[in-house]
Image (cartoon, rainbow, N blue to C red):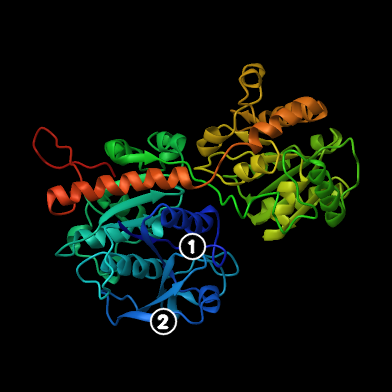
């Protein structure tokens, strides 16, 4: 099978979160599983610099609406997966990240930037493609690629079957209704049975409606988004499409995140020789200016500093942590007021707390290795990767029981210790007190070295690689391909009807 994997992010060159890493690792796993997969991504400046020999393979002088002309460049990544880069400097060569400028403001033309990405994805997945290589499946990732299934719906001739993956439903790509013409979509698309969402246009709604299959990044999150709290306005639509919705737990790059080979660490280690972990703790404290206190546990966090990630809860219990005593090494960036509160906390307790604003790949690895306990108090977490990194590095996590955190972290209690599944600590309520109570349980366990060794063993021996997820996606692709061949054309989305026969879709 031939798979075109469309994504707005690609690590390490452009990433704002887990999507970038997933977009690098999952296609590689699919490639290893025997699929002919190619990654389609915008030609951001770092990608152009990384692949100076990328060659033009297609040119689109006009793709519809007000979208800029673009070329497609082909390059070969060192993981063996070909890259197709949408080369449009006017859209993609800018300061900032994939979505925002250096000041944290959304680019005003994001609808055009990702409309072009979606449009070219659709063209390459149809008879209109100028390439000899034609995909059987177009796999779209998050809202920036959500218009691709809609564009395909309105193209004539043979088209690829489509999969829409939700990495975070809170981000939906909602724009004014008048952007429909600029994007080159027909008026018929702007309907409740289409891209319209409360009189606006939603990229995410387009993908959820028009794609043949929908996936999310963990089984628990697939359940959660069908309820109003985490459905963010799409719960009804997702319940309606529940038979086409599958939760597949993400994996991690087991080669990049391996304490036995990690080049960022002061000393490498594995389960049988955990003294190296202590050496990394000493080095991390020295780097961050924290006191070398053997009886004081070091808590770690690598996260966007946002309400979603629950970092406000951490700020609220800072004084209690200092008095426990416990130390904290935090790396991240996000909400400016929350950043300021955490920086002020570190200023009051410089030997206890370190807050590094921004992102540093090496420091992220060093925190995973050097911390005793990792914190992820997210209000919601579609999958999460850091808890899996932490388990692999022998750093039991404290998490809120939500989304992929529930699918990977088993709370330490009498029953789970007895059956050998306990690997961390979970709490239910998104409150500062619940987080504090969970941290206290974790610190008490840390002081029991025999118990702590069991938790580390349970986490470090789990295989969180991508092979399992790749096989699950391979099954979905095969099912879609079979359905398409049987039907002769891409399967149309089912429609529920009222007694009058009029089509009714949830907004």
Residue 87, image x and y in percent? 41, 77
Q: Secondary structure at mark 2?
A: strand
Disc marking residue 9: 1
Residue 142, by quadrant, is: bottom left
Query: Is residue 183 shown left or right of residue 418?
Result: left
Judging depth in this view, the residue of 60 and 437 nearest the camera is 60
Residue located 19% across and 51% down the image: 484
Residue 361, image x and y in percent? 67, 60
Residue located 66% across and 25% down the image: 412
Residue 414, image x and y in percent? 66, 17
Q: Earlier in the sequence, mark 2 or mark 1?
A: 1
Q: Residues within 10 Å of mark 1 (few under 14, many from 20)?
A: many
Residue located 53% across and 56% down the image: 21
Residue 237, by quadrant, is: top left
Whether residue 44 is visible here, answered yes or no, is: yes
Report the residue marked by disc 2.
55
Whether residue 440 is visible here, answered yes or no, is: no
The C terminus lies in which quarter of the figure? top left
């Amino acid at each position: 099978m031939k798979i075109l994997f469309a994504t707005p992010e690609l690590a390490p060159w452009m990433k704002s979160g887990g999507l970038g890493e997933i977009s690098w690792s999952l296609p590689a796993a699919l490639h290893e599983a025997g699929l002919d997969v190619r990654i389609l991504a915008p030609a951001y400046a770092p990608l152009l610099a990384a692949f100076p020999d990328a060659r033009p393979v297609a040119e689109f002088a006009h793709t519809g609406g007000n979208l800029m002309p673009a070329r497609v460049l082909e390059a070969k990544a060192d993981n063996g997966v070909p890259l197709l880069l949408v080369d449009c400097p006017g859209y993609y060569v800018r300061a900032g990240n994939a979505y925002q400028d250096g000041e944290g403001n959304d680019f005003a033309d994001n609808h055009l930037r990702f409309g072009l990405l979606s449009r070219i994805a659709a063209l390459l997945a149809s008879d209109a493609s100028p390439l000899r290589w034609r995909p059987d499946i177009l796999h779209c990732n998050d809202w920036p690629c959500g218009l691709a299934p809609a564009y395909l719906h309105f193209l004539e001739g043979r088209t690829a079957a489509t999969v829409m993956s939700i990495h975070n439903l809170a981000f939906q790509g909602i724009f004014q209704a008048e952007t429909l013409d600029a994007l080159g979509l027909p008026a018929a698309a702007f309907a409740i049975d289409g891209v319209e969402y409360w009189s606006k246009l939603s990229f995410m709604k387009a993908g959820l409606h028009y794609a043949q299959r929908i996936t999310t990044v963990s089984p628990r999150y697939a359940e959660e988004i069908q309820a109003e709290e985490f459905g963010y306005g799409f719960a009804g639509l997702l319940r309606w499409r529940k038979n086409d919705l599958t939760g597949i737990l993400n994996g991690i790059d087991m080669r990049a995140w391996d304490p036995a080979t990690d080049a960022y660490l002061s000393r490498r280690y594995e389960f049988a020789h955990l003294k190296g972990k202590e050496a990394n703790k000493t080095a991390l404290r020295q780097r961050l200016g924290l006191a070398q206190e053997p009886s004081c546990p070091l808590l770690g966090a690598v996260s966007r500093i946002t309400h979603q990630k629950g970092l406000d809860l951490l700020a609220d219990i800072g004084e209690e942590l200092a008095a426990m005593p416990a130390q904290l090494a935090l790396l991240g960036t996000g909400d400016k007021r929350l950043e300021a509160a955490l920086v002020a906390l570190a200023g009051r307790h410089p030997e206890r707390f370190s807050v590094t604003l921004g992102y540093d790949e090496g420091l992220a690895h060093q925190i995973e290795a050097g911390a005793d306990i990792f914190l992820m108090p997210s209000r919601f977490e579609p999958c999460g990767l850091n808890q899996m990194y932490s388990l692999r590095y022998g750093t039991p996590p404290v998490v809120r029981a939500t989304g992929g955190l529930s699918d990977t972290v088993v709370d330490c209690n009498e029953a789970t210790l007895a059956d050998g599944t306990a690997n961390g600590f979970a709490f239910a309520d998104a409150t500062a007190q619940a987080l504090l109570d969970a941290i206290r349980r974790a610190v008490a366990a840390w002081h029991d070295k025999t118990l702590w060794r069991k938790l580390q063993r349970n986490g470090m021996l789990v295989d969180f690689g991508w092979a399992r997820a790749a096989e699950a996606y391979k099954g979905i692709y095969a099912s879609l391909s079979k359905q398409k061949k049987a039907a002769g054309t891409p399967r149309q989305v089912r429609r529920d009807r009222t007694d009058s026969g009029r089509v009714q879709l949830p907004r």
